[in-house]
Amino acid sequence: MRILVANEPRSYREVIAAAVQALRPHIEVVLSTADDLERNLARLAPQLVVCSELTPSIWTRPLTWIVLYPEGKTQAVISIGGQSTTLDDLEFDHLLRIIDETEHLSEAT
């Protein structure tokens, strides 16, 4: 499974990527800037994208996407297999559960 992490600020995406790689070493985690997000989305075909802004490509391509702090709000908008939800806060253990669920769904398809 591949995760594309492209949220802002850079320090957040680096911490997320490092923690996921440490706790789920079998998962490929790729960092991207917001400017390169669309190109990397098309090139890498990740199952999960973590970003700061939802684009039409993100809406339709990955199995799961997470938008962190949309419009500067302390929220996360999550879509897993087309089912969206908004959380007031996304704790790291919840992120790991989303990763595990996405991995399970991607293996089933």
Image (spheres, rainbow, N blue to C red):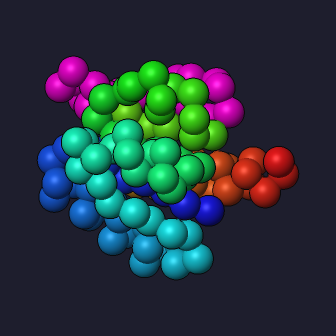
Q: With 63 as the anchor, is 18 left or right in this view?
A: left
Q: Is residue 74 magenta?
A: yes
Q: Nearer the viewer, residue 77 or 36?
A: 36
Residue 55 appears in which quarter of the rendering?
top left
The residue depicted at 44 percent of the width and 37 percent of the height is 66
Q: In this picture, is 56 found above or below 41? A: above
The total number of labels drawn is 0
- What residue range appears in magenta? 68-89
Q: Is residue 100 visible?
A: yes
Quadrant containing the N terminus is bottom right
Q: Is residue 95 visible?
A: no
The residue depicted at 44 percent of the width and 65 percent of the height is 29
**Where residue 72 sits in the image (x, y, percent)?**
17, 25
Q: Nearer the viewer, residue 28 or 73?
A: 28
The residue depicted at 65 percent of the width and 49 percent of the height is 102
**Where residue 28 sits in the image (x, y, percent)?**
51, 69
Q: In this picture, is 13 found above or below 26? A: above
**Where residue 70 sits in the image (x, y, percent)?**
28, 25
Residue 71 appears in which quarter of the rendering?
top left
Q: With 77 as the anchor, is 109 left or right in this view?
A: right
Residue 26 appears in which quarter of the rendering?
bottom right
The residue depicted at 57 percent of the width and 35 percent of the height is 61
Q: In this picture, is 87 found above or below 99? A: above
Furthest-right residue in view? 108
Q: Is residue 38 magenta?
A: no
Q: Nearer the viewer, residue 24 or 44?
A: 44
Q: In this picture, is 32 found above or below 49? A: below
Q: With 22 as the anchor, is 105 left or right in this view?
A: right
**Where residue 78 sits in the image (x, y, percent)?**
49, 31
